[in-house]
């Protein structure tokens, strides 16, 4: 392991993680929810695309074997391990208005560290910190949360979806800017602000093998990987690439 960080409930973090890395996210219990955004580390106009990711893989959930695609049709990260089986890419982050309505109004001036942070504010701070703007707010992936769809079309949040020690591992397929917010899922019906923390661990990934599950998940994934490898070949050295 090269790096480890723990995000307390309500916490936020952002940073650059180079391609060929493994990002392991671990929750310490049910109710934990980590929302994250992805951007290309140096060409930040390229970013995670939720519509392209779901349409290409014909799914409304994310788990092992799925990839996260950019708005340029390239693979940003692959899900190579997952003990939960369902992560929500649809419901976005919780806003200040939603936070106040559900958990009661709080403020840093009155409540100090007991202030209930929102995903909206956390991402706004980290975007500005990374040289981006509020207009760069985009879709997020909510890991450790499950939202199913009823026959009426209503969205149903699944309580107690994850347990202590559950984890997901992302493999970075390009240099990434990762923005994280450990804030409640917007559809979590609990009136108690979650207290679960999230571990973030970064280590080196082995080279992508020819039988890689994420590459071979579907034809759309193969094309997205090929687009990514071509982009890497044209822009920098590609000694870490195995497949042609």
Image (cartoon, helix red, strand yellow):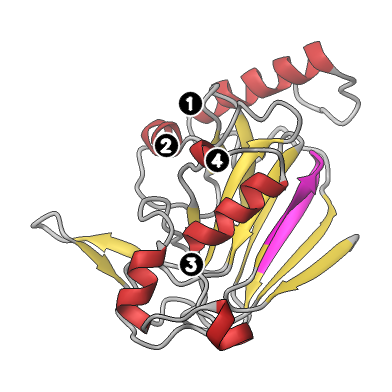
Mark 3 or mark 2: name the one nearer the start of the chain: 2
Q: CA distance from mark 1 to mark 3?
A: 35 Å
Give neighbour class at mark 1: few <14, some 14-19, many 20+ (Cα, 10 Å): some
Q: Which residue is mark 3?
A: 118
Q: Secondary structure at mark 1?
A: helix
Q: Which residues are magenta?
A: 13-25
Mark 2 or mark 1: name the one nearer the start of the chain: 2
107, 154: nearer the viewer: 107
Mark 1 or mark 4: name the one nearer the start of the chain: 4
State the mark number for residue 57: 2
Q: Which residue shows up at 54% across the image and 81% down it?
A: 115
Q: Secondary structure at mark 2?
A: helix
Q: CA distance from mark 2 to mark 1?
A: 7 Å
Q: CA distance from mark 4 to mark 2?
A: 10 Å
Foreground mark, 4 or 2? 4
Quadrant in which the N terminus appears: bottom right
* Residue farthest to the front, as pictured: 109
Q: Position of residue 235 (x, y in %)?
A: 81, 15
State the mark number for residue 220: 1
Give neighbour class at mark 3: few <14, some 14-19, many 20+ (Cα, 10 Å): many
Foreground mark, 3 or 2? 3
Foreground mark, 1 or 4? 4
Q: Which residue is mark 4?
A: 68
In the displayed structure, would residue 115 be above or below residue 232? below
In the displayed structure, would residue 136 be above or below residue 35? above
Mark 1 or mark 3: name the one nearer the start of the chain: 3
Left or right: residue 83 versus residue 55 is right
Residue 19 in the magenta stretch? The answer is yes
Mark 3 or mark 4: name the one nearer the start of the chain: 4
């Amino acid at each position: 392991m090269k790096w480890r960080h723990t995000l307390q409930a309500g916490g936020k973090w952002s940073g650059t993680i180079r391609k060929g890395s493994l990002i392991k996210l671990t929750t310490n219990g049910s109710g934990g929810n980590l929302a994250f955004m992805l951007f290309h580390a140096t060409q930040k106009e390229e970013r995670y695309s939720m519509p392209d990711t779901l349409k290409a893989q014909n799914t409304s959930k994310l788990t092992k074997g799925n990839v996260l695609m950019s708005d340029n049709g390239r693979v940003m990260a692959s899900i190579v391990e997952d003990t939960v089986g369902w992560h929500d890419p649809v419901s976005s982050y919780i806003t200040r208005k939603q936070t106040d309505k559900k958990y009661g109004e709080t403020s840093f001036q009155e409540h100090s560290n007991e202030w209930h942070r929102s995903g909206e504010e956390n991402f706004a701070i980290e975007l500005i910190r990374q040289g981006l703007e509020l207009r760069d707010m985009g879709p997020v992936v909510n890991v450790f949360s499950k939202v199913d769809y009823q026959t009426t079309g209503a969205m149903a949040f699944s309580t107690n979806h994850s347990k202590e020690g559950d984890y997901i591992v992302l493999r970075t397929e390009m240099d990434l800017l990762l923005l994280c917010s450990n804030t409640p899922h917007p559809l979590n019906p609990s009136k108690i602000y979650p207290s679960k923390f999230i571990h973030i661990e970064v280590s080196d990934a082995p080279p992508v093998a020819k039988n890689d599950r994420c590459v071979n998940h579907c034809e759309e994934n193969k094309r997205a990987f090929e687009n990514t490898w071509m982009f890497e070949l044209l822009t920098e050295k590609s000694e870490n690439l195995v497949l042609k």
